[in-house]
Image (cartoon, rainbow, N blue to C red):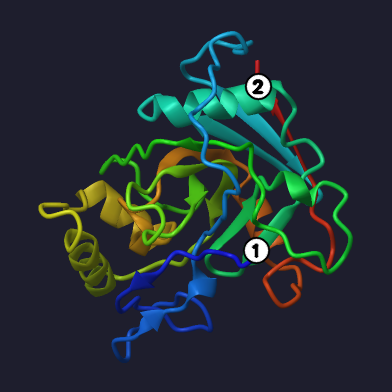
C-alpha cells in the first residue's frame, strides 16, 4: 500500500540532511521529513468511558525502551488525546511495539501495531486501531524537545488534521537562535494568524531545542519529564532506508501510580 505523507513547505533554518538550522535558500521539506501515518480505516472514535483505570487528570506514564526509561506527563489541555492514550495503555496496546521511524535531530516515532514481531525489512507505518482523534491544537503546547505528539495523514486527504488513533512521535529537534525562531514564527503564522511565541517558549527553543515548524499543525499532548537522554540514545542508532532502526527498539508503556 502506498504511504501517504504530510508535506511541510517553507525554509526550515537547519544545517544537516534533515530539518536543520541555518537557512541558505527557500526549499521544500521532503515527504520523508515529517511524522506520518496512513490509516486503513477511518471509523468514529470508540467509546472509552469503561476503560480508564487511573484518574483522567495529571496522568503520567512510564515508557520503557531498549535504551532506557522515560516518564511522560499527559496534558489535561488535550483531553481527547489524553483519554485515548490512557485507553490504549490500559489495553497494553503499545507493549512490544517498535520505534519504527527514527530521524536524528527530528523525532522518534512508534505506535504502529504492525510493528509487533515485524521481520527485518518489512515496511511499517501504516497501522492503527481503525479510528482517528480530532485535532487539539494549543498555542501553549509547542514541539520542544521531549514533546509527545500524534502522527497523522497529510493535509490532502486529511484537511481536518485528525490524528492517528495510536501512532505518536517524541521530539528530539535542534536548538535555534532568535532569528531562526522569528522565521519559524512567521511560517506558523501563515496558517495561524496572530500566533506568537512567548518569551518562555523562545527560551526553550534556544536552550532545549525542538521542531518549531510543526507547531499548530500536529497535536502535542504530553511531554517527557524524565529521561530526555533516552531520545538521544535511540536516535544515535543506525537506520535502514525508510528510517527504521537496524536494531529493533521495543517499547512498553505503563501508568505511574
Mark 1 lies on residue: 102
Q: Residue at x 30, y 79 (%)?
A: 11
Q: Which sits earlier in the primary sequence, circle 1 or circle 2?
A: 1
Question: Is residue 114 rendered to the left or right of residue 129?
Answer: right
The image's mark for residue 256 is 2
In the displayed structure, would residue 209 be above or below residue 138?
A: below
Q: Residue at x 77, y 51 (%)?
A: 115
State how far apart marks 1 and 2 are (Cα): 26 Å
- Dividing the picture into quarters, in which one does residue 214 lie? bottom left
Residue 89 position within the rendered picture, expressed as x and y whole percent measured from the top left: 67, 27
Q: Nearer the viewer, residue 193 or 47?
A: 47
Q: Residue at x 26, y 67 (%)?
A: 184
Local secondary structure at mark 1: strand
The quarter of the rendered structure image containing the C terminus is top right
Is residue 191 at least partly visible in the picture? Answer: yes
Residue 10 position within the rendered picture, expressed as x and y whole percent measured from the top left: 30, 76
Crowding around mark 2 (Cα neighbors within 10 Å: few <14, some 14 to 19, many 20+) is: few
- Dividing the picture into quarters, in which one does residue 86 lie? top right
Crowding around mark 1 (Cα neighbors within 10 Å: few <14, some 14 to 19, many 20+) is: many
Amino acid at each position: 500500500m502506498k504511504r501517504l505523507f504530510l508535506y511541510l513547505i517553507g525554509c526550515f533554518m537547519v544545517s544537516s540532511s534533515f530539518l536543520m538550522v541555518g537557512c541558505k535558500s527557500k526549499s521544500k521539506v521532503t515527504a520523508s521529513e515529517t511524522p506520518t501515518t496512513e490509516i486503513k480505516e477511518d471509523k468514529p472514535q470508540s467509546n472509552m468511558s469503561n476503560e480508564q483505570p487511573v484518574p483522567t487528570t495529571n496522568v503520567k506514564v512510564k515508557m520503557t525502551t531498549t535504551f532506557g526509561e522515560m516518564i511522560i506527563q499527559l496534558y489535561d489541555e488535550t483531553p481527547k488525546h489524553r483519554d485515548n492514550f490512557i485507553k490504549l495503555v490500559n489495553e497494553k496496546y503499545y507493549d512490544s511495539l517498535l520505534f519504527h521511524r527514527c530521524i536524528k535531530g527530528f523525532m522518534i516515532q512508534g505506535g504502529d501495531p504492525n510493528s509487533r514481531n515485524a521481520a527485518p525489512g518489512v515496511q511499517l507505518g501504516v497501522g492503527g486501531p481503525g479510528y482517528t482523534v480530532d485535532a487539539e491544537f494549543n498555542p501553549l503546547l509547542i514541539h520542544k524537545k521531549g514533546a509527545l505528539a500524534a502522527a497523522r495523514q497529510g493535509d490532502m486527504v486529511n484537511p481536518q488534521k485528525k490524528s492517528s488513533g495510536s501512532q505518536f512521535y517524541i521530539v528530539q529537534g535542534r536548538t535555534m537562535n532568535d532569528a531562526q525562531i522569528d522565521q519559524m514564527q512567521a511560517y506558523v503564522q501563515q496558517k495561524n494568524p496572530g500566533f506568537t511565541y512567548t518569551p518562555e517558549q523562545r527560551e526553550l527553543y534556544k536552550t532545549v531545542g525542538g521542531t518549531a515548524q510543526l507547531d499548530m499543525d500536529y497535536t502535542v499532548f504530553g511531554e517527557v519529564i524524565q529521561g530526555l537522554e533516552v531520545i538521544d540514545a535511540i536516535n544515535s542508532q543506525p537506520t535502514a532506508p525508510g528510517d527504521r532502526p537496524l536494531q529493533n527498539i521495543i517499547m512498553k508503556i505503563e501508568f505511574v501510580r
